[in-house]
Amino acid sequence: MTRIPAAALLLATLAVAALAASSMDSPIRIVLTVGFFLLVPGLAAVALARPAWTSVTLAIAIGVSVAADMLVAQAMLLLGWHPVWAFGALLTVSAGLLAVQVVRPA
């Protein structure tokens, strides 16, 4: 992933965080949040490996995103986290991985 898509995903992550913090009830919030959970954590992690094909990147990213969501959900249950804390942890890790991709040399 180049810097521009990584920066766009980072901005989307920040938009999801802002919408979650504002507690605004809107269909756009639902669409962005579901899209975040399905794509962003996986794309942030998979892009570090730099797979050769875009189709492989997207397929693996969806699987990694769902797996990361499940791990965070299990941690939330085991540790007694509030859902806001779990969502914040997933946002923070995803934003950190995307920030690395934005600033690292190509």
Image (cartoon, rainbow, N blue to C red):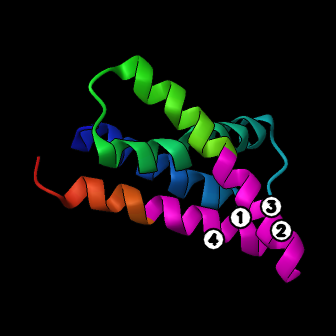
Where is residue 37? Give x, y as percent: 67, 45
* Residue that carries the numbered disc 2 in the rendered image: 83
The answer to whether residue 81 of the structure is visible from this angle is no
Residue 12 disc label = none
* Residue that carries the numbered disc 4 in the rendered image: 89
State whether the magenta stretch is mostly helix, strand or loop: helix
3 versus 68 height, above or below: above
Upstream in sequence: badge 4 or badge 3: 3
Q: Residue at x 62, y 52 (%)?
A: 16
Q: Is residue 90 magenta?
A: yes
Quarter the N terminus occupies: top left
Q: Residue at x 31, y 44 (%)?
A: 49
For discs 1 and 3, the disc positioned in front in the rendered view: 3
Give yes or no for contact between labels 1 and 4 (Cβ–Cβ under 8 Å).
yes
Give yes or no for contact between labels 1 and 2 (Cβ–Cβ under 8 Å).
yes
Count residues near mark 1 (Cα–Cα under 10 Å), then give few for <14, some for 14-19, many for 20+: some
Quarter holding residue 23: bottom right
Separation (CA) of disc 2 from disc 3 = 8 Å
Separation (CA) of disc 1 from disc 2 = 6 Å
Separation (CA) of disc 1 from disc 3 = 9 Å
Q: SS for tag 4?
A: helix
* Residue that carries the numbered disc 1 in the rendered image: 87
The answer to whether residue 23 of the structure is visible from this angle is yes
46 versus 14 height, above or below: above
Q: In the rendered picture of this protein, how many numbered marks are placed on residues? A: 4
Upstream in sequence: badge 2 or badge 3: 3
* Residue that carries the numbered disc 3 in the rendered image: 73
Identify residue type, mark 4: Ala
Residue range of the region highlighted in magenta in the rendering: 67-95
Identify residue type, mark 3: Ala
Separation (CA) of disc 4 from disc 3 = 11 Å
